[in-house]
Amino acid sequence: MRPLLHGLSCIHKHVYLRNNTYYYRSDIPPDVAHHFPAAEVKRSLKTSDPGAAKLAALDMELKVQQAYILLRVGNLSDDIIQLVVGAVVPDARKPTAPEEKGNVLTDVINTYTAEKQSNWTDKTKMEVAGVFRLLVDILGDVEISIITRPMLIQLRSSLLKVPPNFYKKNPGKSAKDVIDSPTESGISSKSVNKHMSRIGSLLKYCQEQGMITSNPATELQIVDKQRVDQERSAYSVSDIKKIISNLPSATERPERYWIPLIGLYSGMRLAEMCQFHVDDIIKVDGCWCFDINNASNKQLKNDASARVIPVHPKLIELGLIRYYEGVRESNNPRLWMNLSYIHLHGYTNTFGKWYQRYNREYVTDDPKKVFHSMRHLFTDTLKQAGVQDTLISELVGHSTSGSMTMGRYGKRYQPRILLEALEKLDYGIKL
């Protein structure tokens, strides 16, 4: 046996070299030894490189100590003890015959998805499938009842190491590979929170069906100290001038000219504008309006998104209604015939990619300033002008159900009232 690996200050005595491969070996403490099939933990570190062995040994030592802590907690079921021991001594895991399995993860996921997916959009189905694939990949196809809170906390930490779109970029690979040796930044804490929320909903369903007695995934969100209104930054007046001064001609690509302007003067979501049909421009009590709806193949974010809002006078002055009338006379069904429909993305895909390039080339390098920043700017400008919150909410398609008076008894504002609020929008620039 070669001398123990030098440079491993706290665990050097646990590493040795044999046949040009480093191994980890440590004695099991007497108080937990009865859970293990042997008196020591012995694992190959699968490397002949001292530096790699050092990192692998540190990771192994952490797993071993975590196992000891869990075993010392006591009152663990046999299945959980087997899982904890098997994490550090794989040979100790007892194979379970298929007929002995209870509610395993993949079966529960299939049942849950079949029951719930009728209320999901295609995009939601794809997102949920991605979350559950990661769940099974990292935890394994385990029985639902052995999933504990410590396991989910470890899962949450592991998710932070998985790069965005991992399976798309690495077909056939396991997320475990990148968790053990991360080479790039993982998904954001916001995305991890969404993943944990999906997993929490799955386990809540399991609790409701009597598969587990409690939901171990409650309140596992990562606390983000950043305020919601700081997740994206609003454009500045200087940014607006750059957006407007560099807009392409409306002749060949009218959507690239008009959609940014409509965004600035309506606060609408990009998807709402990209899917406009000719019939969505209407006149109500002599007031030109946008009718935002989900007729045909159009999609809305939620029920509150359906609304009728006035066209800002500045857009009319610039010629939007003249453009609309020209499209109507040509018998085209949609305002932007250059935009094609894609099942998962609606009509936004082509325009969204163009605007990302345009924004970085002509407007700003700030990653927090994106097309959605127009919506932030629109809302904040009206707020600073003293416009009521309920009026702003109706203009941008936010729910007012938090107020019983407005949500249950209040009717929609008439376009003329909304127009009065909209006319207070002033960016302090000339077009």
Image: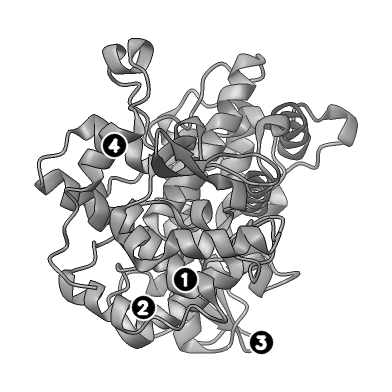
Q: From mark 2 to mark 1, how far is it between C-alphas? A: 9 Å
- Give the mark, 2 or 4, whose residue is nearer the N terminus: 2
Name the amino acid, label 1. Answer: Ala
Q: Is residue 321 visible?
A: yes
Q: Residue at x 72, y 55 (%)?
A: 343
Marker disc for residue 8 = 2
Q: From mark 3 to mark 2, how far is it between C-alphas? A: 20 Å
Q: As rendered, which of 337 and 80 lies closer to the eye?
A: 337
Name the amino acid, label 4. Answer: Leu
Foreground mark, 4 or 3, reads 4
Q: Mark 4 highlights which residue?
A: 418
Secondary structure at numbered mark 1: helix
Q: As rendered, which of 357 and 15 lies closer to the eye?
A: 357
> Horizontal and vertical percent for residue 368?
30, 67
Q: Locate the N terminus by quadrant.
A: bottom right
Q: Residue at x 55, y 59 (%)?
A: 325
Name the amino acid, label 2. Answer: Leu
Q: Mark 1 highlights which residue?
A: 57
